[in-house]
Image (cartoon, grey):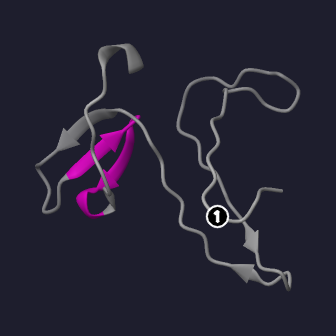
Amino acid sequence: ALEPGNNEFEWDGFDNNKNLYTSGQFTYEVTAVNNNDDQISVEKTIKGVVTGINLSDEEPVIYVNSTPLSISQIINVNMVEDTEI
């Protein structure tokens, strides 16, 4: 369980038995409850490197770590130092 508020996690690519998953796209699920154990909505975000842009459709698609995102899903874009990539 995590404390209320914003939380971050980083997955190392291993399962609970220390087996390394092969490369690919993965999803994650977050469930949150309030003090009465009622399920509440959660805003999920990701951070990553822009790996592509597709401008050929009606709405541009930005690929972050190869995950397609519509331009309306992008909250913030920052430049990083080469050492962070």
Secondary structure state at the residue bearing disc 1: loop
- Split into 4 quadrants, where in the image is the N terminus? bottom right
Quarter-of-image position of residue 52 = top left
- On the question of residue 85 being in view, the answer is no
Give how far across and how far down residue 39 sits, in percent: 75, 80
Residue 7 or residue 25, whichever sits in front: 7
Q: Using a 10 Å C-alpha cutoff, classify the residue at mark 1 as few (fewer than 14 neighbours), some (14 to 19) or many (20 or more).
A: few
- The structure residue drawn at horizontal position 54% and vertical position 66%, both measured from the top left corner, is 43
- The structure residue drawn at horizontal position 13% and vertical position 62%, both measured from the top left corner, is 58
Span colored in magenta: 61-72
| Magenta-span inclusion, residue 55 | no
Residue 34 or residue 57, whichever sits in front: 34
Q: Tell me the chief SS of the magenta region.
A: strand
Question: Where is mark 1, residue-wise?
Answer: 5
- The structure residue drawn at horizontal position 68% and vertical position 61%, both measured from the top left corner, is 30
Up-down relation of residue 1 to residue 80 (above or below): below
